[in-house]
Amino acid sequence: MTTPADQPTPKQQLREQARKNRIAQKDKEAVSQKICETFMKLPAYQAAKTVMWYVDAGSEVRTRHTLPVALTHGKRVVVPYCIVETNELELFHLEDMSELVEGAYKILEPQEDLRKLPAKILQPEELDLVMVPGTAFDARGGRMGQGKGYYDRLLARARKDAPLVALAFECQMFPSIPVDAHDVFMDLVITEVGVYAGEGRK
């Protein structure tokens, strides 16, 4: 017999529904390209000198096919990668797609031997614009991630004047995302339908 303790919480149910929606998204490549192009047309992108892109994993909005274009824009392109031992995200200055190799869970990550080079290491405070992935969002800029807080910890260190811009498929948008005290609101959420102006950080 199922007890209440065995029942998924509303947050878990929403996360699971968002994942299913994202997996079922059709034409991921074309839709992702449209979303990435909108990101690159933002005034904040045009003005930024150092931009963090995420490298897509699983069913996330694809970025890996647009990253080579971003590398030609004369900006410092930064990608995060996870340190499994500490559950923290570190930042890597990406200069060529060949610097990425397939790591755990078939996720593209910076090559191990390049990560400790001083010229490749950046801090969140150096970012002028931050691209953020996620599982589910709402029009306020509320964000639900994987539930492990990787990005929450990273974003807490980003400068307040560095916009946080999430990329998502429209199917990942919900009327309201349950948020906790540590959750960070996005400044913008971009989908294939349009751009949502979020509440951002207070």
Image (cartoon, grey):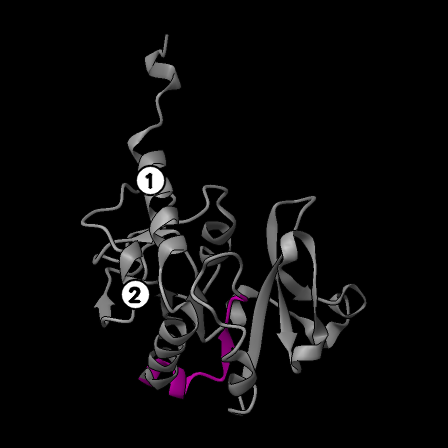
Nearer the observer, 173 or 82: 173
Magenta-drawn segment:
43-55
Nearer the observer, 27 or 157: 27
SS at circle 1: loop
* Number of on-image labels: 2
In reply to whether residue 53 is colored magenta, the answer given is yes
Vertical position of residue 89 compared to residue 181: above or below = below
The label shown at residue 187 is 2
Residue 91 seen anywhere in this rendered image of the structure: yes
Q: Position of residue 72 (x, y in %)?
A: 55, 91
In reply to whether residue 48 is colored magenta, the answer given is yes
Residue tagged 1: 180
Specify the farthest residue to the left. Answer: 175
Say what amino acid the circle numbered 2 marks: Asp
- Horizontal placement of 8 versus 113: left or right? left
Specify the farthest residue to the right. Answer: 113
Nearer the observer, 166 or 98: 98
SS at circle 2: loop
Q: Residue at x 70, y 58 (%)?
A: 103
Of callouts 2 and 1, which one flags the residue occurring earlier in the amino acid sequence? 1
Q: Position of residue 202 (x, y in %)?
A: 28, 57
Q: Residue at x 36, y 68 (%)?
A: 165
